[in-house]
Amino acid sequence: MKLTHRLSLPLAIHPMGLRLRQPVGLAACVLLAAAGWVAQAQAQAQKPTYKCDHNHYTDSLSDPKAQGCKLMEGGNVTVIQGLRPNPASQPPVKMAAAPQSGSQAGPAGQRVDAGEQRARDSDSKQILESELRKAEIRLTELTSEYSNGEPEKRGDEGRNYQKYQDRVAELKAAMNRVESDIAGIRRELGRNGASAASK
């Protein structure tokens, strides 16, 4: 009787390259271990979970009803503990007092003198009108540079068309921003005019 014993190597040379060759026994062991792990995980997942007082969750109670716990249904419980500040270690927060003087407003709810309010409104209107003039000048400059979407090419933009397109897009975006600023300033001026007229 002739016995032949064949040795199985983990790597075998194949015409297309190296291939991994697993013995059948090892694959069966790995499959069996994976099945056991899945069964254990399912058994743990099937344990009932109880919610007790003060957001306390447990799965190991002998008599949950006696301890005031209720059965949780419909999913796992994930608890993330946050940090609790230690009040003794933190210094108390102090609020800074606003300086009190004749030109500044008093505590909340105190009315301002009518003459002082008119002066404030006038200052506010002058500032807004100045900002409006600056924004309109900037819009005029951008519009002339934009030249209906075909501004003059600069230096290397003749050879680099993408750089030219990027500058055109930046000019258009800047014009939109300035137009939006102008509209906002005009709205604010309208509000100031309406509030001054109502007083």
Image: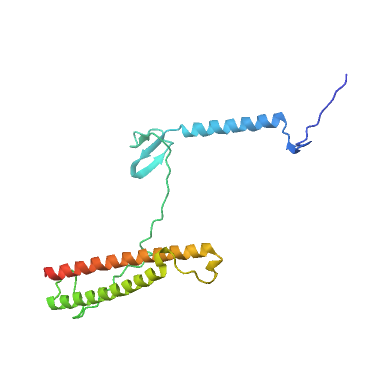
Q: Quadrant of residue 146?
A: bottom left
User: In screen coordinates, is 145 left or right of 33?
Assistant: left
Q: Quadrant of residue 124?
A: bottom left
Residue 42 is situated, as x and y percent measured from the top left of the image, at: 50, 32
Q: Residue at x 20, y 66 (%)?
A: 191
Q: Is residue 93 above or below residue 48?
A: below
Residue 28 is situated, as x and y percent measured from the top left of the image, at: 66, 29
Residue 106 is situated, as x and y percent measured from the top left of the image, at: 18, 74
Q: Quadrant of residue 174?
A: bottom left
Judged from this view, the residue extending furthest toward the right is: 1
Q: Residue at x 34, y 42 (%)?
A: 53
Q: Is residue 1 above or below residue 146?
A: above
Q: Is residue 144 visible to the viewer in this orientation of the structure?
A: yes
- Front residue (pair 154, 11): 154
Q: Quadrant of the N terminus?
A: top right
Q: Is residue 192 above or below residue 40?
A: below
Q: Residue at x 43, y 38 (%)?
A: 76
User: In screen coordinates, is 149 left or right of 157?
Assistant: left
Q: Residue at x 42, y 36 (%)?
A: 75
- Front residue (pair 123, 97): 123
Judged from this view, the residue extending furthest toward the bottom is: 102
- Front residue (pair 90, 45): 45
Residue 9 is situated, as x and y percent measured from the top left of the image, at: 78, 35
Judged from this view, the residue extending furthest toward the top is: 1
User: In screen coordinates, is 47 left or right of 65?
Assistant: right
Q: Quadrant of the C terminus?
A: bottom left
